[in-house]
Image (spheres, rainbow, N blue to C red):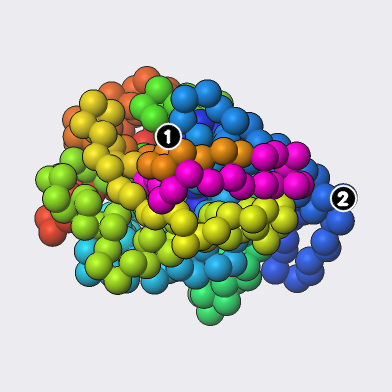
Amino acid sequence: MLGHTVNAHTTNAHTTNAHTTNSRTINFQAIRNFSCEFASDVRDGLTRPGQKELPSKYFYDDLGSALFEVISHLPEYGLTRADERLLQRHACEIVDRLDAPVAVAELGSGSGKKARWILEAIARRQRTSYYPVEISRSALLMCQRELSDIDSISIVGFEREYLDGLLEVAAHRQRSQHLLVLFLGSTIGNFDRPAGIKFLAEVRRILEPGDSLLLGTDLEKPSAQLLKAYDDELGVTAAFNLNLLARVNRELDADFDLGQFAHVARINRQARSIEMHLESKRRQTVRIPAADLRLEFAEGETIWTESSHKYSPEEVFQMARAAGFRCQAQWIDEQWPFAENLFIAE
């Protein structure tokens, strides 16, 4: 769990209008298309044989994004602070390893706060463009507010899925520019391992040789530590997870009774991951008119909403090679096992 995710089992979906720093045009056809796609994804996931599921990318409506910001400050969830410590300490070293001139794209930028250290380091040596790619319009607006004070940075946001947005960024790059892609936090962990390598390979196909990817990876740690991080004492993560059902209610006219579902975090030792589920407290029926669904839930039946895979430091180098990159450098936080990894496109 971190950043604005693409589900392990849903790697590409809706596109909507671009958002720029100077204007915003709302494409109403795109909004209707998004609503239809949301309904389709909900129908496909909740009728999947064996295990009902919902794509984790739909966590991040305005309320979900705000709840995640709170999660990032919880004492149990050290991942965000580890990510930020590494970026703050090593931004200059990271930038010094890049060929100039460089433009920056960030996949799942959120508020853009973590990109600040990289952008400030680049701005000290050149003017540059920053392209946040987000499916949350409110996050793009926060990004603009967060980073608008940095001199020599032009911000152009894209309200897109990761790969669609990156394709647009690549079309904007100047011929002589190198591209640095930021994929921070532990978002790559929301993919299962084969899907994660496939996604990285798709990123590589968009890039040119010599371009770079700064990838965050959460590393393996004790199960008890993970369970506390994904099921905090205050219940913020539970609210974040349940908001996914609330969103289906709001946008698809469903009748989920949130009081009859419980947030559950589980360790999957075989996959080396932690999973989030929503468990039905009783036998119940749920209707989702906009998805043309009537669902039966047994007591104890769950909806799988997210997986977060954890890695060994050595495994990250193997992932880079499998996807067409070379891992040039790796920085590991000492307080919370987490790594920033600089991949170079070969």
In the image, 99 versus 275, the foreground residue is: 275
User: Residue 174 placed where, x, y %?
Assistant: 66, 45
Residue 191: which disc? 1
Q: In which quarter of the image is residue 293?
A: top right
Say which amino acid is labelled 2.
Gln
User: Residue 264 placed where, x, y %?
Assistant: 33, 50
User: Residue 71 placed where, x, y %?
Assistant: 36, 66
Q: What stretch is highlighted in magenta?
A: 276-294
User: Residue 280 placed where, x, y %?
Assistant: 44, 47
Magenta span main SS? strand
Asked if residue 321 is positioned above or below residue 304 in the image, the reply reads above
Say which amino acid is labelled 1.
Phe
* 138 inside magenta stretch: no
Residue pushed farthest front? 283
Residue 146: which disc? none
**Left or right of residue 59: residue 175:** right
Q: Is residue 183 visible?
A: no
Disc 1 is placed on an element classified as loop
Please report the residue visible at 29 percent of the width from the left and 54 percent of the height from the top: 230
* 287 inside magenta stretch: yes
Asked if residue 96 is positioned above or below residue 322 in the image, the reply reads below
Residue 29: which disc? 2
Neighbor class of circle 2 (other Cα within 10 Å; few <14, some 14-19, many 20+) is few
Q: Quadrant of the C terminus?
A: top left
